[in-house]
Image (cartoon, coloured by chain):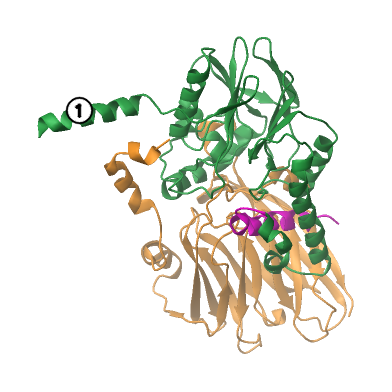
Amino acid sequence: MKYSKLLPAIFITALLPIAAIAAGDEARWNKVLKPEFFAQQTLEESDNVIELEAPMRAEDPSLVPIKVSSKIKQSPDRYIKKIMVLVDNNPYPYVGEFEFTPKSGKADIAMRIRVNTNSYIRAIAQMNDGTSTMTKKFVKASGGCSAPVGANLDEAMTRLGKIKFRMEGDVKVGEPNSVQLMISHPNVTGMQMDQVTRFVKKSHFVKQINVSFNGKPILTAKTDIAISSDPNFRFYFVPEKAGELKAEVIDTSCETPTDRSVCTGGNTYTETFKIQP
Amino acid sequence: MKVLLLPVLFMASVQALAATALPVKEVADGVYLHVGKHQFPDSKNHGEIANLGFIVGQKCVAVIDSGGNPEQGLALKQAVSDSTPTPICYVINTHVHPDHIYGNSAFKAAEVKFVGHYKLAAAMAARGPYYRDKAAGQLGVTLTAADLIPPDIEVKDSLKLDLGGRSLTLKAHATAHTDNDLSVYDEKTNTLWLGDLLFTEHLPTLDGSLKGWLAEIDKLEQQSFRYVIPGHGELVTDWPQSMQAQKHYLTLLLTEIRAAIKKGRHLEDAVKTVGYSEKNNWVLFDDYHRKNVTTAFAELEWED
């Protein structure tokens, strides 16, 4: 079948403007996101404070691994206080905010996110002195058959609230140690097409994560629907002695996927993990 | 000038009215198959890549997978009416992927029932907005909500469809290639239409559960069929022999990803190291392999 020959030329032309968002397109950032999140703030753009790793292509739009690495050591005098992550062209660009302390040792954060279409991913670090630095990477959407919803949400739902810590290697006292936090949660976006189906599914996602070691905060995060199902984070903490890691995870459900004004408080899930150097 | 243009316009409009029939082959008595090309769906092929076809009974035709866009659906519909005067009663969707369901709207009619896995409607709703957005940019196809047609008849476990002197058994599988895989068994010719539960030549794509898919394969392997029709690849006449390559690939993913997780490797590393010994055995390996590793890794890290 010669589909293309049947298409009127005007129809093909009409499709072109929305066909691809190219690298260099920062319209949504400049017009919407920067005014919304960083109005009247100076953002230095550089890789001097943090660096962002992301794949060139989002192989699986439901699960794109990204990593923010810090270039400076967390010390009581000078430390990264907060890292915000945004995906310019997602339906809800706000991915989350991750707050660190000097006890974090190293303000690195790795996570898995949903990337709907060709887009810049941005990480903005705010220092304890209030100055901010931004870095960004352009990621191309993958196409193909997968969608940014997750392959097996029912499975994630059956494990809902299960939390695992995984230490990466042996525990080193007084040094930054890397730990992985895995949360079983479908992180439902609520972006479904209601007219196609008989049911309406609201968003249902992890909104807050508090991780502490021996009662002192290491990582405090606000997260949203762009976090992949079964949220997965890697970060650092500095154990001075044996003790207990504790994660507190709170979810929520909102009426619409892109508005946070009508949400209901959800459940709190907790998990602890013994650290024995 | 006007005189010269008119016949051209006339011919163009005739061509637009009567869709060109999709090439199909009768692979078994009353079983018609169109074999798709092994290509990544793009704006050149407009998503026309999957195997499609239909089975003809005395009273009814059942279409199995409708095409990668509404235009291809029309071409398949034309192929049905070129092959038989028997009317279409059912359009069966083997799963939610665009190359199998985007032709649905071409068949929409009062007397046609759409049939799918009981989780198909939910999958269509969840993926619909995204698929629709992508169709324009990536496939060069315009889709509306009306093009995504959920099933009128949902299969929870299994269901028999009577085509008149011919009975089809539809089976809803547990999560495997996707969470909404449906297979169609034609008793008359001992043919199993497996959809994307089977890939040959084209790299299998995982969008459900690796362990679930391997479990379904184990069950299917115990059974014997005269013909098996994959979602991508040629007609299989030596079941289960032609399925071994897929089984090997999926088993290798399982083994190597489990080993990587045990060693404390991260997903980002696994996509660069796991399964590359299979690279030369498949078409479209570079397009889908890393996505497969990603999906499988996210599943397997919750095992213990």
The type of residue carrying mark 1 is Pro
Q: Residue furthest bottom?
A: A77
Quarter of the N terminus of chain B within the rendering: top left
Q: Is residue B291 magenta?
A: yes
Q: Kindly identify which residue carries mark 1.
A: B7
Question: Chain A drawn in what color?
Answer: orange
What residue appears at the point 65 percent right and 65 percent down from the top-left corner? A111
**Does residue B151 appear anywhere in the picture?**
no
Q: Is residue B188 magenta?
A: no
**Does residue B186 appear anywhere in the picture?**
yes
Viewer-closest of B263 and A220: B263
What residue appears at the point 61 percent right and 53 percent down from the top-left corner? B283
What residue appears at the point 66 percent right and 85 percent down from the top-left corner? A74
Does B143 sit above or below residue B164? below
Q: Which residues are magenta?
A: B282-304
Residue B7, horizontal then vertical, whole percent:
20, 28
Residue A112 quadrant: bottom right
Q: Residues within 10 Å of mark 1 (few under 14, many from 20)?
A: few
Q: Residue furthest right?
A: A276
Residue B184 quadrant: top right
Q: Is residue A206 left or right of residue A32?
A: right
Quarter of the C terminus of chain B within the rendering: bottom right
Does A20 sit above or below residue B222? below
Q: Is residue B136 left or right of residue B275?
A: left
Q: Chain of mark 1?
A: B
What residue appears at the point 32 percent right and 45 percent down from the top-left corner? A12
Residue A81, horizontal then vertical, whole percent:
60, 78
Task: Say what secondary structure mark 1 lies in.
Answer: helix
Residue A94, horizontal then vertical, whole percent:
52, 60
Q: Is residue B3 left or right of residue B271?
A: left
Which chain can be seen in green? Answer: B
